């Protein structure tokens, strides 16, 4: 008898676990239903009646959107309620995103897609967009757009032109970005340096950064900081029209503008020492916006999302005043030329029929004004900027930021990353080789030469497969 | 009659044994064996994680050896292994011998040395990153205070990054080998030392001719465990350097992770995993073959 007890006990435990899990699920369902329905019995009955009238089930759309989830949950529930009010037959089910770096969140998406999880809509950065389209994870949307009379070109002609793959659109570029310089007015005042002007050059930037840098140890004031990404130097070459990948499909890093640009970042960090070095930035994993928010960095070269990051870092308690100014430009280039990248949202390649139609409705919603306002409030730059969405943006900013309107002025905008299937490999090579140069592991010339050589291999490989 | 009865009992015992083993066997099959077989098959395809699986023969393997990042990753992995294993085992042995003496607070020391091994690699990596920070890190501040004006930036320096990762990894895992060595030291019968003392052997001679030979089976086990562990190095590299600066600390597992989960090249990544498996397998095989020459049982 004694022998039997153990297996029986084990089975019992197992059953309890299973029923616990099931109970958890049902509880959640009941709860969410109650939330929708309201608390009183009367209301519940009403809805029950309605349900009988409309026998058709709601179409459920599962979506994973890390560019929104990373900001806050409020905006998500707002988006959900607004969309579902307009489309009573569609229900949005959100797949929770990870807290973490963009890379970690993207990795989670990869694992979910490969694990065959049911995700209907998901967002992607530019490199992922190309991969997803080529792998059939995204599907072309042009037939749906044609049927609805939806014009992709309203989302920004340049971006759309570059987002077409074999003349098809595979997603909605619902967020773009705009790079500029954020500067701490208090640090400028303390150093007696005049505030930068919108038509400044990179040489002026370098001089300004030098003047702002002082102190040692915990009193250190850096002239500037920027993210560790390759675009922070390569962007200067692209402002002059240089491209990672030339029109004929060969790598374009041998353009001398790239060498000069990398040399420039080297000089800033390793010669002038007016900003933290690459080694330092990578090691501390210090977020560039955090350093700026701490108030010991004069300028930060980055994109519009930094508005939201500063705000959430400081929680509204500003210990200093800041403003923004246009990106510096190389000598001989039109002032105000800047760079940026798009983020896309597209639908799973295996969606068909009714579900596909429903997903398309949600995609259009992402291209619309409601989502635009929502994004603007968080400092993101939506695909569509109407005067109303701009108002939302200004309202979200602290009063001392006066110059944010530069984002909406006409400007030349170059793509931050190549529109190419090998975009992520290209980015990896650029980062690895420039890191070598910026940590004194290699000369700038050698790094550029190696970059060109390795890019050739990566591009050939990607186009072959 | 009697023998039949016994075999029945035996059968029952065997069945019980298998039942007890079953959870582990199922786990092993499900999470280790089948995935390994699958990886082997996938390594001959151009599968990208989703969609059609097309076989492409050996082209993944051919591409692997022509791709310079794989060669660099392979080299770095050997660098790590050769840098870590011998040094770590020597330190472990030394500390095990020290801890085998009768000193005050012995148990506290033993616990202290074992602490890093049971700590989370992620947490420990972040602490080391803070310690090694080029400007604010205590290590460089100390070096500057005693007169080194230009200390290396450790993880941020192409030449220093790998040695730094090696030192950190040694610190992280030597506690385990100390414990194994301690256990080995305590099995050496004291009469051997007494005999050696009678013969007039000094401390070094006793260590050289009694302790070391008696420990060879333990050393053999430790070498194999440490080597396999060193080829799988990933966590600390992923967190502290992400394979950089440049590709200075990119190891094979890091490379597999990059190609599989950032470039969606499952087939290619599986091929690298198969190569890693073969390398570990061959090295372990050689170590087993070689043991006859130096291991005393």
Image (cartoon, rainbow, N blue to C red):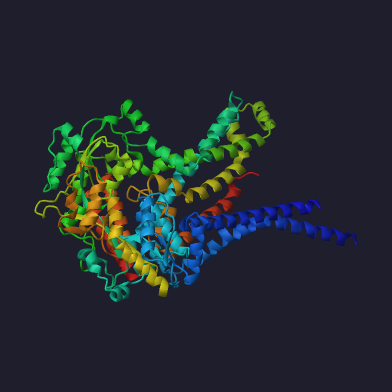
Quarter of the rendering containing residue A285: top left
Q: Residue A287, can we see it?
A: no
The relative height of residue A50 versus residue A302 in the rendered view (above or below) is below
Residue occupying image coordinates x 40% and y 42%: B163
Q: Residue furthest left?
A: A332
- Percent from the top left, x then y, of residue A56? 47, 72
- Percent from the top left, x then y, of residue B252? 43, 54
Query: Which quadrant, please, contains the C terminus of chain B?
Result: top right
Q: Residue furthest right?
A: B1
Query: Which quadrant, please, contains the N terminus of chain B?
Result: bottom right
In depth, the one of A385 and A327 nearer the eye is A385
The relative height of residue B79 versus residue B178 in the rendered view (above or below) is below
Left or right of B291 on screen, residue A211:
left
Quarter of the rendering containing residue B114: top right
Residue occupying image coordinates x 13% and y 33%: A192
Number of dots carrying numbers? 0
In depth, the one of A27 and A318 nearer the eye is A27
The relative height of residue A91 versus residue B175 in the rendered view (above or below) is below
- Percent from the top left, x then y, of residue B53? 45, 71
Left or right of A320 on screen, residue B257:
right
Residue occupying image coordinates x 51% and y 58%: A42
Left or right of B43 on screen, residue A281:
left
Q: Residue A271, can we see it?
A: yes
Left or right of A313 on screen, residue A93:
right
Q: Residue furthest top?
A: B104
In depth, the one of B98 and A58 nearer the eye is A58
- Percent from the top left, x then y, of residue B40? 50, 65
Quarter of the rendering containing residue A282: top left
């Amino acid at each position: 008898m004694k022998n039997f007890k153990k297996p029986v006990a084990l089975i019992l435990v197992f059953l309890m676990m299973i029923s616990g899990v099931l109970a958890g699920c049902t509880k959640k369902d009941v709860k969410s239903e109650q939330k929708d329905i309201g608390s009183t019995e009367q209301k519940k009955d009403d809805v029950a009646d309605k349900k009988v009238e409309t026998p058709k089930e709601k179409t459920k759309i599962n979506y994973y959107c890390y560019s929104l989830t990373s900001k806050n949950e409020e905006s998500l529930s707002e988006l959900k309620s607004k969309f579902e009010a307009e489309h009573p037959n569609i229900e949005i089910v959100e797949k929770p995103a990870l807290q973490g770096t963009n890379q970690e969140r993207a990795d989670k998406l990869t694992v979910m897609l490969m694990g065959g999880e049911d995700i209907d809509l998901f967002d992607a950065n530019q490199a992922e967009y190309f991969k997803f389209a080529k792998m059939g994870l995204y599907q072309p949307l042009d037939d749906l757009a044609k049927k609805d009379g939806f014009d992709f070109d309203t989302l920004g002609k340049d971006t759309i032109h570059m987002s077409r793959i074999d003349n098809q659109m595979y997603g909605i570029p619902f967020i773009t970005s705009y790079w500029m310089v954020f500067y701490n007015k208090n640090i400028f005042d303390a150093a007696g340096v005049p505030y930068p002007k919108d038509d400044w050059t990179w040489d002026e930037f370098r001089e300004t950064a030098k003047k702002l840098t002082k102190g040692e140890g915990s009193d250190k004031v850096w002239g500037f900081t920027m993210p560790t990404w390759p675009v922070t130097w390569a962007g200067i070459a692209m402002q002059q029209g240089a491209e990672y990948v030339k029109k004929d499909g060969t790598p374009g890093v041998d353009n001398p503008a790239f060498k000069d640009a990398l040399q420039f970042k080297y000089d800033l960090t390793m010669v002038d020492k007016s900003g933290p070095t690459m080694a330092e930035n990578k090691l501390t994993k210090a977020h560039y916006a955090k350093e700026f928010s701490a108030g010991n960095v004069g300028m930060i070269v980055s994109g519009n999302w930094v508005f939201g990051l500063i705000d959430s870092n400081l929680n509204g308690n500003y210990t200093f005043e800041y403003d923004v100014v246009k990106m510096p430009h190389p000598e001989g280039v039109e002032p105000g030329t800047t760079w940026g990248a798009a983020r896309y949202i597209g639908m799973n390649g295996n969606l068909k029929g009714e579900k596909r139609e429903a997903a398309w409705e949600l995609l259009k919603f992402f291209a619309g004004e409601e989502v635009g306002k929502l994004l603007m409030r968080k400092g993101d730059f939506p695909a569509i900027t109407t005067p109303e969405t701009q108002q939302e943006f200004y309202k979200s900013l602290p009063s001392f930021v006066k110059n944010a309107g530069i984002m909406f002025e006409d400007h030349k905008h170059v793509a931050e990353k190549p529109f190419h299937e090998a975009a992520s490999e290209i980015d990896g090579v650029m980062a690895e080789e420039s890191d070598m140069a910026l940590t004194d592991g290699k000369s700038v010339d050698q790094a550029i030469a190696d970059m060109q050589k390795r890019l050739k291999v990566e591009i050939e490989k990607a186009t072959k497969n | 009659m009697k023998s039949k009865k016994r075999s029945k009992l035996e059968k029952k015992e065997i069945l019980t044994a298998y039942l007890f083993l079953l959870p582990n066997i199922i786990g092993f099959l499900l999470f280790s064996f089948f995935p390994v077989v699958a990886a082997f098959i996938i390594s001959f395809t151009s599968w990208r994680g989703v969609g059609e699986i097309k076989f492409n023969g050996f082209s993944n393997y051919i591409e692997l050896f022509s791709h310079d990042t794989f060669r660099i990753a392979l080299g770095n992995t050997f660098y790590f292994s050769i840098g870590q294993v011998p040094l770590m085992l020597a330190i472990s042995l030394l500390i095990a011998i020290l801890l085998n003496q009768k000193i005050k607070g012995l148990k506290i020391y033993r616990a202290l040395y074992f602490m890093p091994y049971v700590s989370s690699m992620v947490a420990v990596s972040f602490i080391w990153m803070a310690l090694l920070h080029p400007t604010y890190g205590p290590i460089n501040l100390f070096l500057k205070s005693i007169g080194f004006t230009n200390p290396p930036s450790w993880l941020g320096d192409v030449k220093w990054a790998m040695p730094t990762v090696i030192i950190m990894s040694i610190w992280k895992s030597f506690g385990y080998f100390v414990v194994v060595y301690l256990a080995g030291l305590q099995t050496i019968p004291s009469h051997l030392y007494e005999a050696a003392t009678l013969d007039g052997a000094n401390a070094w001679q006793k260590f050289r001719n009694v302790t070391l030979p008696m420990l060879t089976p333990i050393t053999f086990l430790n070498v194999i465990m440490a080597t396999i562990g060193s080829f799988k190095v990933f966590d600390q590299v992923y967190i502290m350097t992400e394979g950089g600066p440049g590709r200075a600390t990119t190891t094979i597992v890091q490379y597999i992770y990059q190609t599989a989960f950032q470039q969606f090249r499952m087939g290619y990544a599986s091929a690298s995993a198969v190569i890693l498996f073969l390398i570990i397998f061959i090295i372990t095989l050689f170590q087993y073959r070689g043991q006859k020459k130096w291991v005393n049982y």
